[in-house]
Image (tube, rainbow, N blue to C red):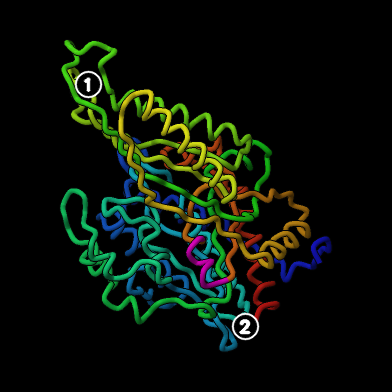
């Protein structure tokens, strides 16, 4: 089965011109003076984008958008049989000063695939739905992948009630309600195993694998595991001018030493699918004339291999013990995230390969080193992901770009994959 070519279901193609127009229209919502996009969850731009999507979908499908308790947006077309739907989608929110393709591409490409099938009069056995998830990106409420986690039961109403906006202190549950959701109804509306037959997400790679190899389409094999721990270093604050160097217990120097030791541990894996970052550091008292007495930092490791992760944590523990002894500081650690890698569905991967081979289109099989809504959908449905190249590996910035030719190829691959899954899946 893996090596055979297939006859593509029908010579149907997506409308590249319409898709490009929709991409640039959505990108105009939240556009800032730096040409980036500010469209964080709950913001006026988020609300405007939601209204625009609802109008777009009403025109394309003649159906009102349904909003679930997590404020996720749903639309689509009916199927001939009483079967669980095939769902395509991603998210429409953006990081501050972000790009126009991250998330938005997946929503609008899903829309284009379903609209093309509807216009062609293609009758499917399964219902075919489009979803735009709420708050996939980090936001002022400090809850990412909110929509997919909440609707699959990984975030409860109780947890959501504990979050407020970092500046306005508005309750997250109030914002969800303002957007048409209702966290109080979550527990009675959760997606369960069997509710969705398959979920497909197309996304920019946000890395350089496809771009460097000149390949238009990537089949995601798995989504990396993410491990984070909060580390607090307690030294001794003292006068920066009068304290001899030999008497210092500098928490910031200890943190800097930990950072370089951490980098050496990551590099020692000799694997491209293992990365580590200390991207957050808070120094107290943070004054030019006071020796830093306390430092808080967050260390993150991304790897699809739990065995590799365990070895790295052990090596980090050894380095921390040495730093404590050498610098006479105290270090406390707390794990704040330990999310296992998630495998993408093998059948969907095989269908994607068959479609690409029949179109004589090269592809790469690659892991995703970023998290996605697909991680959480995989818990309740057969899930697959398709990547398109990020030019120069750029993402989460105004320079983010993907060629429309590559997007068109991915869209036609998704379209044919939907037609095959509709035939092969019950």
Quickly name the residue at label 1.
291
Q: Which residue lies furthest to the bottom in this view?
A: 82
- Left or right, residue 313 beside residue 234: right
Q: Name which residue lies at 16% across and 54% down.
A: 169
Nearest the viewer among 246 and 223 is 246
Specify the label residue 325 is tagged with. none
Q: Residue 125 carries which label?
A: 2
Q: Where is residue 340 in the image (x, y as percent from the top left)?
A: 52, 56
Q: Work out whether residue 386 can be spotted.
A: yes
- Residue 269 picture location, percent across and down: 60, 36
Few, some or many residues within 10 Å of mark 2 (<14, 14–19, 20+): many
The image quadrant of residue 240 is top left
Q: What stretch is highlighted in magenta?
A: 375-381
User: Which residue is pictured at 73% across the width and 59% down the height?
Assistant: 353
Q: Give the total number of marks visible in the rendering.
A: 2
Label 1 CA crowd tier, 10 Å (few <14, some 14–19, many 20+): many
Mark 2–mark 1 Cα distance, whole angstroms, equals: 69 Å
Q: Which of marks 2 and 1 is in front?
A: 1
Question: Does 141 sit above or below residue 232?
Answer: below
Quick one: label 2 or label 1, which is nearer the N terminus?
2
What residue is shown at x 41% (from left), y 65% (from top)? 149
Q: Position of residue 156 (x, y in %)?
A: 32, 70
Q: Is residue 338 left or right of residue 28?
A: right
Assign the C terminus to one quadrant of the image: bottom right
Helix, strand or loop under label 2: loop
Pick the front one: 307 or 319: 319
Compared across the picture, whether 174 is left or right of 259 comes to left
């Amino acid at each position: 089965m893996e090596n055979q070519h297939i006859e593509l279901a029908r010579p149907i193609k997506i409308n590249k011109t319409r898709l490009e127009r929709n991409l640039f229209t959505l990108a105009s919502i939240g556009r800032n003076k730096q040409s980036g996009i500010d469209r964080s969850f709950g913001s006026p731009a988020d609300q405007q984008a939601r209204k625009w999507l609802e109008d777009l979908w009403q025109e394309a499908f003649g159906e009102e958008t349904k909003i679930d308790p997590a404020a996720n947006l749903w639309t689509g077309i009916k199927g001939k049989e009483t079967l669980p739907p095939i769902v395509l989608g991603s998210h429409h929110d953006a990081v501050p000063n972000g790009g126009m393709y991250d998330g938005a591409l997946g929503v609008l490409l899903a829309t284009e695939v379903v609209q093309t099938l509807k216009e062609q009069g293609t009758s499917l056995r399964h219902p075919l739905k489009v979803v735009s998830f709420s708050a996939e990106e980090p936001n002022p409420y400090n809850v990412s992948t909110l929509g997919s986690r909440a609707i699959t039961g990984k975030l409860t109403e109780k947890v959501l009630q504990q979050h407020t906006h970092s500046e306005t202190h508005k309750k997250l549950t109030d914002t969800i309600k303002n957007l048409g959701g209702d966290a109080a109804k979550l527990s009675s509306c959760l997606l369960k195993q069997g509710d969705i037959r398959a979920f497909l997400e197309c996304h920019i790679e946000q890395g350089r694998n496809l771009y460097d190899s000149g390949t238009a389409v990537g089949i995601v094999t798995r989504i990396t595991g993410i491990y984070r721990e909060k580390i607090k270093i307690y030294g001794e604050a003292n006068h920066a001018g009068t304290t001899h160097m030999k008497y210092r217990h500098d928490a910031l120097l200890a943190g800097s030493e930990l950072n370089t030791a951490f980098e050496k541990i990551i590099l020692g894996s000799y694997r491209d699918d293992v990365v580590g970052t200390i991207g957050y550091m808070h120094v107290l008292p943070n004054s030019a004339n006071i020796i830093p007495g306390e430092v808080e930092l967050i260390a993150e490791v991304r790897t699809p291999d739990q065995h590799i992760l365990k070895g790295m944590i052990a090596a980090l523990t050894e380095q921390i013990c040495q730093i404590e002894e050498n610098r006479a500081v105290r270090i406390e650690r707390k794990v704040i995230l330990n999310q296992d890698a998630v495998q993408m569905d093998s059948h969907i991967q095989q269908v994607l390969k068959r479609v690409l081979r029949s179109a004589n289109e090269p592809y790469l099989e690659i892991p995703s080193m970023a998290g996605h809504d697909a991680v959480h959908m995989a818990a309740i449905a057969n899930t697959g992901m398709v990547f398109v190249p990020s030019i120069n590996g750029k993402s989460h910035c105004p320079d983010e770009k993907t060629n429309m030719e590559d997007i068109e190829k991915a869209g036609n691959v998704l379209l044919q994959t939907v037609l095959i899954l509709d035939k092969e899946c019950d």
